[in-house]
Amino acid sequence: MPPKDNVRPLTRVIERTSLVAIAAIGPRKFKPQDLITIIVRQQKKYEADAKLDTEKKWDLEGKLSEWFRFYPHRRLGTDRLSNGQPGFKWKFDNKYETDGENEREDKFITRVTATVIDVKPNGNLVLEARQSEIHDEEKIEITLTGVCRSEDVTPDNTILSTQVAELVLVERNRGAVRDATRRGWVPRILDWARPF
């Protein structure tokens, strides 16, 4: 066990005379380059439901009762509209309905050991972890950074990722499986253009 802080003076007499009294354990002191295991349990669920219903109707109608015309000798006058009164009538009816639903759930569970790179004056620990695995042609790289309270580190030297502030978790995969699931440039262009 690492050295602990001295216990409170009021309990020293009890600890010396009692057969069952246990000395209080002070907070653990961390220093740079100490190792802490982070239990990563990130779970995210997203659900969205949308419905759109629009309807547009236009009804336009008009008639021309008077118009002008040029007569001989540069005279401008009213046209008698001998062929009747021209007019227009226009109707437009548009109805658009759409219904969309989206559901996504992501889970990421692993363990990674982080190095304490700095201890803040208030006792908070700055953590950084890097992990690399190679299985046949598959390569997995995990990078994690964040800040946690020293009080949150359990006696077995672990902490949950949900207790890490400013958490940045990056996972990169390379290999045949990643190549098979990666989108090509044609689907990317179509998704960017969204023609439908």
Image (cartoon, rainbow, N blue to C red):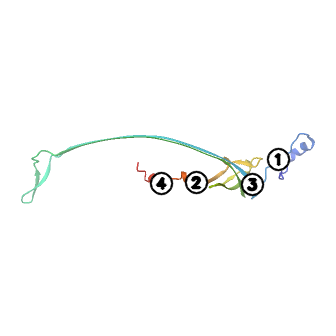
User: As shown in the figure, which amino acid type bears the numbered disc 2?
Assistant: Ala
- Extreme-right residue of the structure: 17
Residue at label 4?
A: 188
Residue at label 1?
A: 25
| Left or right for 131, reference 21 | left
Residue at label 2?
A: 176
Disc 2 to disc 4, C-alpha distance: 20 Å
Within 10 Å of the Cα at label 3, are there few (<14), some (14-19), or many (20+) other Cα atoms? some
Label annotation for residue 42: none
- From this viewpoint, is residue 119 visible? no
Disc 1 to disc 2, C-alpha distance: 51 Å
**Contact, CB < 8 Å: mark 1 with mark 4?**
no
- From this viewpoint, is residue 70 visible? yes
Q: Residue at x 85, y 47 (%)?
A: 8
Disc 1 to disc 3, C-alpha distance: 20 Å
Q: Residue at x 10, y 46 (%)?
A: 83
Residue at label 3?
A: 35
> Residue 127 location in percent, x, y?
69, 55
Within 10 Å of the Cα at label 1, are there few (<14), some (14-19), or many (20+) other Cα atoms? few
